[in-house]
Image (tube, rainbow, N blue to C red):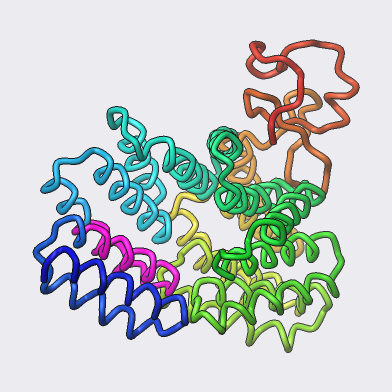
Amino acid sequence: MGQDQTKQQIEKGLQLYQSNQTEKALQVWTKVLEKSSDLVGRFRVLGCLVTAHSEMGRYKEMLKFAVVQIDTARELEDANFLLESYLNLARSNEKLCEFHKTISYCKTCLGLPGTRAGAQLGGQVSLSMGNAFLGLSLFQKALESFEKALRYAHNNDDAMLECRVCCSLGSFYAQVKDYEKALFFPSKAAELVNDYGKGWSLKYRAMSQYHMAVAYRLLGHLGSAMDCCEESMKIALQHGDRPLQALCLLCFADIHRSRGDLETAFPRYDSAMSIMTEIGNRLGQVQVLLGVAKCWVARKALDKALDVIERAQDLAEEVGNKLSQLKLHCLSESIYRSKGLQRELRAHVVRFHECVEETELYCGLCGESIGERNARLQALPCSHIFHLRCLQNNGTRNCPNCRRSSMKPGFV
């Protein structure tokens, strides 16, 4: 298969994919991979296969094609192709919750000599790195990366990238419990979809609606949360987006748990867990188990809750997510306190405070923990985070943590 025929077949596959005929598109692209002698065409079709398998939640297949794409890029001896393939390798590892590997491959991308693709893909590299840092609960580094990605988006008028960064920032602020910003950023993403997204994939709308649903639930606006989650789920089902279906099921379960409807919550958690396990989203599995444990606590079934927490703790440690570990130690602490088991209680209190130190989740001005309750936060240009009220009441002109930065609020 020559260059022209390869191009035609890639385009045919794209048309099938965009019309939701995913399996047929995969068949076309796989045939191109088997028969084409055009290295550039093979590189492009591998990129299509990486994207398709990512959206279907087939992350191990995604990783396999990303590795082959790197080999193809090396044959082409082109730094632009190498940058793109390393970014796909980073994303594959991000999806599989291999966050240290993700960061390593992103650094490889950033270390490549000047390339044409650098200006276009630099923001996507920073976004993937930020998501990995967030997966490891390294909040300052995550925020630095998200800010870089947002600057790339603004400097290059890349509304699509800005939309994705806003969704990640929504997740960031949901985790540190500034629920106002957790809603603001995905709402901004939804505005971008409305203003610029006429030719975009519907996944961008679905993604923004899901993150809005999470924020609305945390704010206690359960009706709005349900509406947004239903819209996101509808699109996810239409497009066969298994990862997003799992996240929506988790959100539905959390909404029902917030309403006290545990009978409805449990089967949603089970369905979410089934998909999370199938696709390999270990951090998602931790979040499901945390919700299930809270349900058992609400039912006073404390031993069942502890069994679930133990499973979740193993996964959280495996992934390296300190915030999940912190939450699980906090929940264990409350259970052992109610059971009057002092030795176990003390062990979890110690680990809880160790996790707080490791995540640096405390305000450098008042010393209180960040993320214990809903509070308005403000990041400085150095990406250190403080309570907004503390910054407003503070008389110094430099960052209280690093002493170098201006007190002017940061970009995000």
Which one is in front, 280 or 339? Answer: 280
Total numbered circles: 0
Residue 169 horizontal side relative to residue 101, left or right: right
Work out which residue is located at the far front of the displayed protein and give it.
4
Q: In the image, what residue occupies the spot 63% across and 65% down?
A: 198
Which one is in front, 261 or 302? Answer: 261
Q: In the image, what residue occupies the spot 71% across and 74% down?
A: 229
**Quick check: 150 above or below 314?**
above
Bounds of the magenta segment: 43-68
Residue 120 horizontal side relative to residue 13, left or right: right
Among the 4 quarters of the image, the one containing residue 371: top right
Residue 151, given in percent of the width and then of the height, sits at 58, 34
Residue 202, given in percent of the width and then of the height, sits at 59, 70
**Quick check: 50 above or below 23?**
above
Residue 284 horizontal side relative to residue 249, left or right: left
Residue 159 horizontal side relative to residue 256, left or right: left
Magenta residues: mostly which secondary structure?
A: helix
Among the 4 quarters of the image, the one containing residue 272: bottom right
| Residue 9 visible in the picture | yes
Residue 120, given in percent of the width and then of the height, sits at 43, 41
Among the 4 quarters of the image, the one containing residue 360: top right
Quadrant where the N terminus sits is bottom left
Which one is in front, 94 or 238? Answer: 238
